[in-house]
């Protein structure tokens, strides 16, 4: 039988199905959104190096995207947003050509192509 040290010293060997997953406040926002108070709150929000996080201003319709480089130096881009009014759909009738008009155009194009080929043949 093979030697299994976990049998003799179980307190030093965690179970095989256990896994360590570090929990970071910066990488797991509550409810998927991180709310800050103004640009000062966005500046104060800590991020690990090489990461990016959208931060929503709790008082205004402003979005801050804070990004850190490999050295942990932050940059912040500011975006504004506003609610949109619903866009009314245009009726489909104005957006298409009836089949009869399309067929007429195709026949005109074919006639012009035939005339161009005849003129090219006559010019040889």
Image: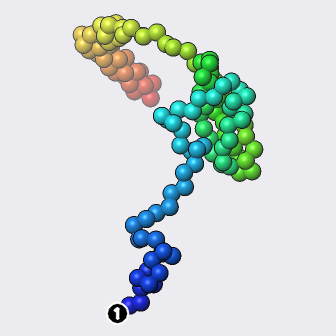
- Residue at horizontal 57%, vertical 33%? 34
Q: Nearer the viewer, residue 69 or 55?
A: 55
Q: Does residue 63 appear in the picture of this structure?
A: no
Q: Nearer the viewer, residue 22 or 10?
A: 10
| Residue neighbourhood size for the residue with mark 1, other residues' Cα within 10 Å, grouped as few (<14), some (14–19), many (≥20) | few
Figure check: 34 above or below 52 = above
Q: Quadrant of residue 37?
A: top right
Q: Secondary structure at mark 1?
A: loop
- Residue at horizontal 48%, vertical 34%? 31
| Left-right relation of 13 to 81 | left
Q: Quadrant of residue 104?
A: top left
Q: Name the residue tied to disc 1.
A: 1
Percent across and percent down for residue 16 are 41, 71
Colouring rule applied to residues:
rainbow
Percent across and percent down for residue 112 are 37, 17
Give the residue at the far bottom of this rendering.
Answer: 1
Q: Quadrant of residue 8?
A: bottom left
- Number of numbered discs: 1
Percent across and percent down for residue 38 are 68, 24
- Residue at horizontal 68%, vertical 31%? 42
- Residue at horizontal 60%, vertical 22%? 58
Which quarter shows the C terminus? top left
Percent across and percent down for residue 22 are 55, 55
Q: Nearer the viewer, residue 7 or 16?
A: 7
Which quarter shows the N terminus? bottom left
Q: Does residue 91 appear in the picture of this structure?
A: yes
């Amino acid at each position: 039988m093979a030697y299994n040290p976990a049998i003799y010293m179980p307190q030093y060997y965690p179970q095989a199905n256990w896994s360590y997953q570090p929990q970071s406040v910066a990488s797991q926002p509550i409810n998927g959104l991180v709310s800050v108070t103004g640009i000062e709150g966005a500046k104060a929000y800590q991020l690990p190096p090489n990461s990016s996080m959208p931060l929503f201003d709790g008082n205004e319709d402003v979005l801050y995207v804070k990004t850190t480089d490999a050295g942990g130096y932050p940059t912040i881009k500011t975006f504004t947003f506003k609610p949109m009014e619903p866009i009314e759909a245009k009726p489909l009738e104005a957006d298409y050509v009836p089949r009869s008009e399309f067929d007429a155009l195709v026949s005109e194009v074919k006639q012009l192509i035939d005339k161009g080929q005849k003129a090219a043949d006559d010019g040889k």
